[in-house]
Image (tube, rainbow, N blue to C red):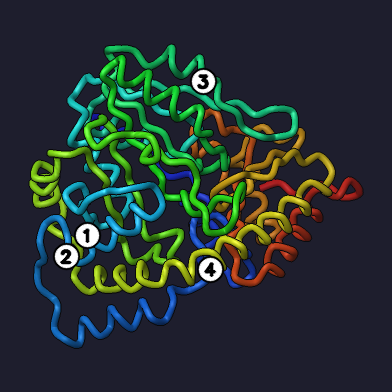
Amino acid sequence: MRTTIAELPGSKIREVANAGIGRDDVLAFWFGESDETTPVAVREAAAESLQRGETFYSHNLGLAELRQAIAGYVSTLHGPVGIDRIAVTSSGVSALMLAMQMLADPGDEVVVVTPVWPNLTAQPAILSARVRRVALAPDAAGAWRLDLAALMAAVTPTTRVLLVNAPNNPTGWTLSRAEQQALLEHCRRTGTWIVADEVYERLYYAGAPAEAAPSFLDLATADDRVVIAASFSKSFLMTGWRLGWLVLPAGHLDAMGKLIEFNHSCAPVFVQRGGLVALAGAAATVPPLVAHLRACRDRLVDGLAALPGVTVASPPGGMYAFFRVAGEADSLALAKRLVAEHGLGLAPGAAFGPEGEGWLRWCFASREPERLDAGLLRLARYLSPSGERPRL
């Protein structure tokens, strides 16, 4: 086994979840998914596809009709994007790994804005690229900020890829249009590729529920070195379906088709049929979902802010509250205590890199907001100044 693979760290989120999975008394908010099932119309489309016997391979790049639907969806949000720039992938995770495989050679430098979902730093490391972390920093109120000058100083002509996830998992930080413009112009000068993980672009609360977060697609030309990774998981309640897509620069689609062949061949046809129905209904289903998540966010953040010793800011995007508790420096130990003693399942901030240590991530995508209230009560019991804090 390659040393790089043998030394890959395990998921700290899974480490916490494994301690609580199977317990009926645990309120689980550790994973990045809603507890609401995929819409019926999407499920029915997949079932009908299976009944028709669509159980064979499709084109490496995906069904032509799905690629066209994705191109139309993206164009509605960000301006014209043709089908000749769209590749369908088996999940957003796969989309990101494919982008890295296309761009990063062993020894290449990849600059990543952190804290971030651990897959994004692990993927270039698996390919033996050199990962350089540039950290966001929290202000006194708990809102995370980018030091744009520091990031631009880190991206030099020797930097092969700048990897940015915005809206960000776990912090909810979102790039501004001005920051995107500055980064795009800087990367044009240095010759650096931008790989943007925009999976959470529709879960954006700074505007109306139908709006998307600022995207590099709003600014980039078809010839810019910009790759966008997206997914059906979050905005369409399709986490278990494993369906995503890439928006590539002009002229790169054939090469990506070869990479897809060597990775997973193609996305399952019946899953793609579900994706088609999800996109067809996006205008009707996504805004209500975003409005619901905004209400869940406000409910949870207000509840957390009222607890003693908790620092939390309202995230402008994503589906997580990222908060810290005064006096708690070991987030993994704290998350394990909360599961073991109070039945509250949260993700430790350390799972997202050393920058997240001391913080906890709480997914607020709950079909029943009352679950958030119940979780807050359990955290309040832990924080009660009149009682002893439980230990493992």
C-alpha span from label 3 to label 4: 36 Å
Circle nearer the N terminus (1, 4): 4
- Can you tell which of label 1 and label 4 is closer to the viewer? 1
Circle nearer the N terminus (4, 2): 4
C-alpha span from label 1 to label 4: 28 Å
C-alpha span from label 3 to label 2: 40 Å
- Residue labelled with disc 2: 63
Element type at mark 4: loop
**In this picture, is 141 found above or below 238?**
above
Residue at position x 83%, y 49% in the image: 306
Circle nearer the N terminus (3, 1): 1
Residue at position x 52%, y 69% in the image: 22
Residue at position x 49%, y 50% in the image: 212
* Residue 286 at x, y percent in the picture: 49, 65
- Can you tell which of label 3 and label 4 is closer to the viewer? 3
- Residue labelled with disc 4: 35
